[in-house]
Image: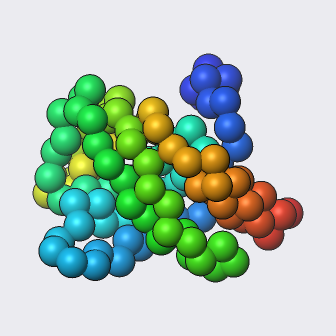
């Protein structure tokens, strides 16, 4: 476990949240955790590794901000035992500085609340 933690360059929130889809049906259904470097989420369909992906999320309270980022799928695992949900890790490759700040604020709040 220590090796996986060493690879992470940014602190992450472990407080998950649902994704509210706007127009159409969002592929991302739930966020497991988020950091300024990426997101681990649940999807209803598999997404092949190395797929470029646009992420649009509404960060919940206390931030209440929509963030948009481009990313790359680095892992996609089927959820056991259901086999109809997938855990997808997305590494952000392009994200606005203001969105990074918003994610930092969300993560910091979550980490302080967890103490």
Say which of 50 and 65 sits in front.
65
Give the image quarter of residue 74: top left
Query: How is colour applied across the structure in the image?
Result: rainbow
Return the x and y of residue 84 as percentages of the image width and height. Answer: 14, 57
Return the x and y of residue 109 as percentages of the image width and height. Answer: 77, 66
Return the x and y of residue 82 as percentages of the image width and height. Answer: 18, 58
Q: Quadrant of the C terminus?
A: bottom right
* Left or right of residue 19, residue 5 in this image: right
**Residue pictured at 51% horizontal, 44% vertical:** 95
Q: Is residue 1 visible?
A: yes
* Left or right of residue 109, residue 71 in this image: left
In the image, is residue 71 above or below residue 3?
A: below
* Left or right of residue 6, residue 27 in this image: left
In the image, is residue 73 above or below residue 39?
A: above
Say which of 108 and 69 sits in front.
69
In the image, is residue 68 above or below residue 96?
A: below
* Left or right of residue 49, residue 90 in this image: right
**Residue pictured at 73% horizontal, 61% vertical:** 105
Q: Is residue 80 visible?
A: no
Return the x and y of residue 23 as percentages of the image width and height. Answer: 21, 78
């Amino acid at each position: 476990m220590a090796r996986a933690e060493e690879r992470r360059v940014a602190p992450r929130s472990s407080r998950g949240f649902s994704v509210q889809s706007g127009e159409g049906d969002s592929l991302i259904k739930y966020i497991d955790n988020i950091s300024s470097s990426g997101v681990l989420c649940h999807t209803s369909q598999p997404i092949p590794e190395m797929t470029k992906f646009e992420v649009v999320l509404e960060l919940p309270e206390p931030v209440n901000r929509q963030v948009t980022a481009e990313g790359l799928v680095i892992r996609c695992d089927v959820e056991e035992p259901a086999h109809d949900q997938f855990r997808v890790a997305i590494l952000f490759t392009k994200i606005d500085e203001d969105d990074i700040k918003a994610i930092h604020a969300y993560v910091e709040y979550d980490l302080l609340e967890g103490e």
